[in-house]
Image (spheres, grey):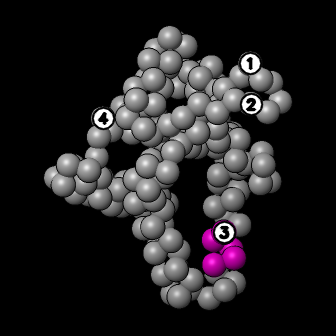
Amino acid sequence: MLAEAFELVYTKFKMHFYQQVFQRFEKREATLTTVESFCMEAIVALGHPTVAEFSQFMNISTPNAAYKVNSLIQKGYVEKVRSQQDRREYHLCPTKKYLDYYNISYAYLETVVKRVEEHFSPQDVEKLEQMLNVVGRELMPEMTLDSEKQNP
């Protein structure tokens, strides 16, 4: 039953995101393909990766990753920013255009979190947060993201 509960919540978040994205398609606002959307989600989750880091995470060749990144740059969803530490390196950064598009998902997340806080006691909310942190940080070791390293 726990698996079904996880699946239900995960599916509802995905389906809400898809609804919002398709509404934008109908208004001709969205220009990302499905694969490009996945690429952008990975770039955001990885926290400003290089093309090589993106390619390695997605398990695709560097030339294939560069092709996908260049398409995203041309559409205005990502930009390359020179590294301050190693001037030969460039990091992939989502643009405001993408962040506005991406916030569809986060606005709903904030709504659900607010509802959780209103529905459950502060102790239950704290316990849920602890449990989700353990699941995300300890029980999913194959999906460690840079954002976790910065916010332990």
Q: Give the image location of residue 51, x and y in percent.
A: 59, 23
As helix, strand or loop, the secondary structure at mark 4 comes to loop
Instruction: Relative to 22, say whether 50 is above or below.
Output: above
Going from N to C along the chain, the mark reached first, 4 or 3, is: 4
Where is residue 146 shown, x and y percent of the image? 71, 41
Give me the C-alpha separation between circle 3 and circle 1.
Answer: 40 Å
Residue at the spot of label 2: 83
Magenta stretch bounds: 125-129
Answer with mark 3 or mark 2, whichever residue precedes in sequence. Answer: 2
Q: Residues within 10 Å of mark 4 (few under 14, many from 20)?
A: few
Measuring from the top left, give residue 15's x and y in whole percent.
31, 56
Quarter of the rendering containing residue 151 = bottom right
Figure quadrant of residue 8: bottom left
The amino acid sitting under disc 2 is Ser
Q: Nearer the viewer, mark 1 or mark 4?
A: 1
Q: Which residue is the extreme one toward the right?
A: 85
Q: CA distance from mark 1 to mark 2?
A: 7 Å
Give the residue at x 49% y 51%. 96
User: On the rendered structure, is 90 left or right of 34?
Assistant: right
The disc labelled 4 sits on which kind of residue? Answer: Thr
Residue 4 bears which disc, if any?
none
Name the residue nearer the viewer: 6 or 108: 108
Q: Which of the numbered marks, if any, corresponds to residue 33?
A: 4
**Mark 1 Cα-neighbour bin, 10 Å: few <14, some 14–19, many ≥20:** few
Residue 127 image offset from top left, x and y in percent: 68, 74
Image side of residue 121 versus residue 40, left or right = right
Determine whether the residue tagged by mark 3 lies in a helix, strand or loop.
Answer: helix
